[in-house]
């Protein structure tokens, strides 16, 4: 599995939880038959106020070429479990570290 980071994406503020999330998501993309997973945003860009992107607790994934992104999102949710929120947006998948308190 190849994991790529889009040119211009800044990783310096990324939290360790998101590093693990990206690695696990890469396995899901691979199992889905995708030759590459592209991280399109971490802490740069414009996001809604208070976004977890700004604290390094979120990342976005490209969905170009994904036949059924809804199925991919279900698989990501299954693997990332309750530690992450996974949301299918119009043109990407948003993944946010958001552990639920016990």
Image (cartoon, grey):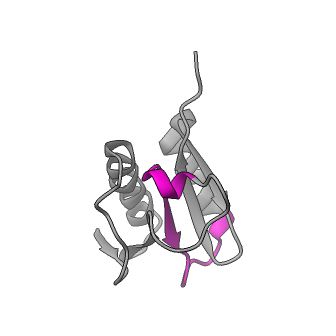
Q: Position of residue 4 (x, y in %)?
A: 31, 75
Residue lying at 58% horizontally and 15% vertically, measured from the top left: 102
Residue 71 makes an appearance in the image: yes
The one nearer the camera, 49 or 10, is 49
Q: Which residue reaches farthest right?
A: 90
Quadrant in the rendering for residue 5: bottom left
Specify whether residue 58 is in view.
Answer: no
Is residue 69 found inside the magenta-colored segment of the image?
A: yes
- Quick check: 50 above or below 84? below
* Place of residue 67 in the rendered image (x, y in percent of width and height, measured from the top left): 61, 78
- Asked whether, in this view, residue 29 is left or right of residue 10, the answer is right
Q: Is residue 50 magenta?
A: no
Residue depicted at 34% across the width and 56% down the height: 13
Q: Which residues are magenta?
A: 52-70
Instruction: State whether residue 70 is above or below residue 63.
Output: above
Q: Is residue 5 left or right of residue 41?
A: left
Q: Residue furthest top?
A: 102
| Mark count | 0
Q: Give the image location of residue 39, x and y in percent.
A: 41, 70
Q: x, y percentage for residue 30?
A: 38, 65
Outermost front residue: 49
* The quarter of the displayed image where residue 17 is located: top left
- Say if 89 sits above or below 55 in the image: below
Image quadrant in which you'd find residue 46: bottom right
Q: Left or right of 48: which side holds 21?
A: left
Residue shown at 29% from the left, 68% from the top: 1
**Residue for point 71% across, 75% down:** 90
């Amino acid at each position: 599995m190849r994991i790529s980071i889009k040119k211009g994406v800044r990783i310096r503020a990324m939290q360790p939880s998101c590093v693990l999330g990206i690695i696990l998501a890469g396995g899901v993309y691979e199992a889905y038959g995708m030759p590459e997973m592209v991280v399109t945003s971490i802490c740069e860009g414009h996001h809604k106020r208070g976004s977890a992107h700004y604290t390094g607790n979120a990342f976005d994934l490209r969905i170009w070429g994904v036949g059924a992104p809804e199925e991919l999102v279900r698989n990501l949710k299954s693997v990332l479990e309750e530690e992450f929120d996974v949301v299918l947006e119009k043109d990407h998948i948003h993944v946010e570290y958001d552990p639920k308190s016990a």
